[in-house]
């Protein structure tokens, strides 16, 4: 399926094109043709972005000089997924849920992407042999009740490939919940034809986990909007859960997040996770210090309904898994050669490090 992508300055909408600074031009040039996440944005997302360098949508796809800054805490596999890899595509870290890295690309690159290193030049969409391997594993592991279908972004595959995958999973394990993890409703809402929604509805139990970071990503442009697509999924009986990444300069205020989550609730979507940023290389300038994040989350809780409040969580760097973050999650602070770290306890009481800044 051909993803509509803008990959050069010349093809950006006029106002954005005029706004590209000489420094950004140099970064785009440095990244083009390399493996490290070149400029790529859909016309839809680009048209929602404003030309101001601080615009919260523009910042998500426009390369910046800061990506080349050294980051002593960066990890090539920030989630430590390699450790829990059970087949070529399946990661089994939590007892009753597994993650399928279905591969393929994304409809635009987010500058803060945690799959940054692995994704570049990564494998294509999962093939028949890899599907069979994953299904065989799932058949042997009846404790798995949910399968997360992630990517890249699985919606960059065409409907026939998705159908083949979903049908195989459904056959291997009838009743297992399919969780489709995607950002395409936001970046490429045109991808969701009535046929696509019908395909999802045919494979219940199914849940859509959509990545949204800012209220303006839901806006309408050229007759389509993420808001309207997500609402039609809900109306087709497909629950939609929202995952948001806490990003410095983009959504790092309680008010900005409250506006987003209220709007989601109005559309019938459930805010699910607010993620503290993973330690991917080149993304440190988007990291909100943990203490600041905890303060924002506390303020957020007093602004909005509990129905609109996601869990604040972090994937512990190096494979510790996800933990929820709340005010007394920090056990203590210690010095390291790369800078100070907090020690956070996982559910079993084991301590894991996360940088202070
Ligand atoms: C996030 C994640 C899951 C799902 O966890 P939930 O808390 O149920 O959302 C499953 N497997 C892996 C490897 C994950 O990273
Ligand atoms: S959509 Fe997700 S996987 Fe793709 S570039 Fe953005 S954060 Fe990374």
Image (cartoon, rainbow, N blue to C red):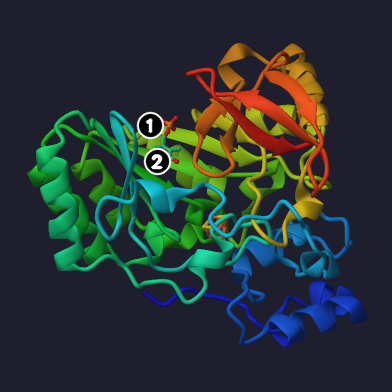
Q: Is residue 287 above or below residue 1?
A: above
| Figure quarter occupied by ligand 1 | top left
User: Image point 56% across, 76% down: which residue?
Assistant: 5
Residue wearing tag 2 = 208
Residue 113: percent from the left, percent from the top? 61, 57
User: Image point 58% across, 54% down: which residue?
Assistant: 114
Residue 138: percent from the left, percent from the top? 16, 42
Answer with left or right where residue 103 lies relative to residue 295.
Answer: left
Residue 319: percent from the left, percent from the top? 49, 41
Residue wearing tag 1 = 239
Evaluate whether residue 265 shows in this view.
no
Indicate yes or no: mark 2 CB to ligand 1 under 8 Å: no
- How many numbered marks, from 0 up? 2
CB contact under 8 Å: marks 1 and 2: yes
User: Image point 74% across, 45% down: which residue?
Assistant: 247
Classed neighbour count for the residue bearing mark 1: other residues with Cα under 10 Å, few (<14), some (14–19), many (≥20): some
Q: Is residue 86 above or below residue 324?
A: below
Cα distance between the residues tagged 1 and 2: 6 Å
Q: Which of disc 2 and disc 1 is earlier in sequence?
A: 2
């Amino acid at each position: 399926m051909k993803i509509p992508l803008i990959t050069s300055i010349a093809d950006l909408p006029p106002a954005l094109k005029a706004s590209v600074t000489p420094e950004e031009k140099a970064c785009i040039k440095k990244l083009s043709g390399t493996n490290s996440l070149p400029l790529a944005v859909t016309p839809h997302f680009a048209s929602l972005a404003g030309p101001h360098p601080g615009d919260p949508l523009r910042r998500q796809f426009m390369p910046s000089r800061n990506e080349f800054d050294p980051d002593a805490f960066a990890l090539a596999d920030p989630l430590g997924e390699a450790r829990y890899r059970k087949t070529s595509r399946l990661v089994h870290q939590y007892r009753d849920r597994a993650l399928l890295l279905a591969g393929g690309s994304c409809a635009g690159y987010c500058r803060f992407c945690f799959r940054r290193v692995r994704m570049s030049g990564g494998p294509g969409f999962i093939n028949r042999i890899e599907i069979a391997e994953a299904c065989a594993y799932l058949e042997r592991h009846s404790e798995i009740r949910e399968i997360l279908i992630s990517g890249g972004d699985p919606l960059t595959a065409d409907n026939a490939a998705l159908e083949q995958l979903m049908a195989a999973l459904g056959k291997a394990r009838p009743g297992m919940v399919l969780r489709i993890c995607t950002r395409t409703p936001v970046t490429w809402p045109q991808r969701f034809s009535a046929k696509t929604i019908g395909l999802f509805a045919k494979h219940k139990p199914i849940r859509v986990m959509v990545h949204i970071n800012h209220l303006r990503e839901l806006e309408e442009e050229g007759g389509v909007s993420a808001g309207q697509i997500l609402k039609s999924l809900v109306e087709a009986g497909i629950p939609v859960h929202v995952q948001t990444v806490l990003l410095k300069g983009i959504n790092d205020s309680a008010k900005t997040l409250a506006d987003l989550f209220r709007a989601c609730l109005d559309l019938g979507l459930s805010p699910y996770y607010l993620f503290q940023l993973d330690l991917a290389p080149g993304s440190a300038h988007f990291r909100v210090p943990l203490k600041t994040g905890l303060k924002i989350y506390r303020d957020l809780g007093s602004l909005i309904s509990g129905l609109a409040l996601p869990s604040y969580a972090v994937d512990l760097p190096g494979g510790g898994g996800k933990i929820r973050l709340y005010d007394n999650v920090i056990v203590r602070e210690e010095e390291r050669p790369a800078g100070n770290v907090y020690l956070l306890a996982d559910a079993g009481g084991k301590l894991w490090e996360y940088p202070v800044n």
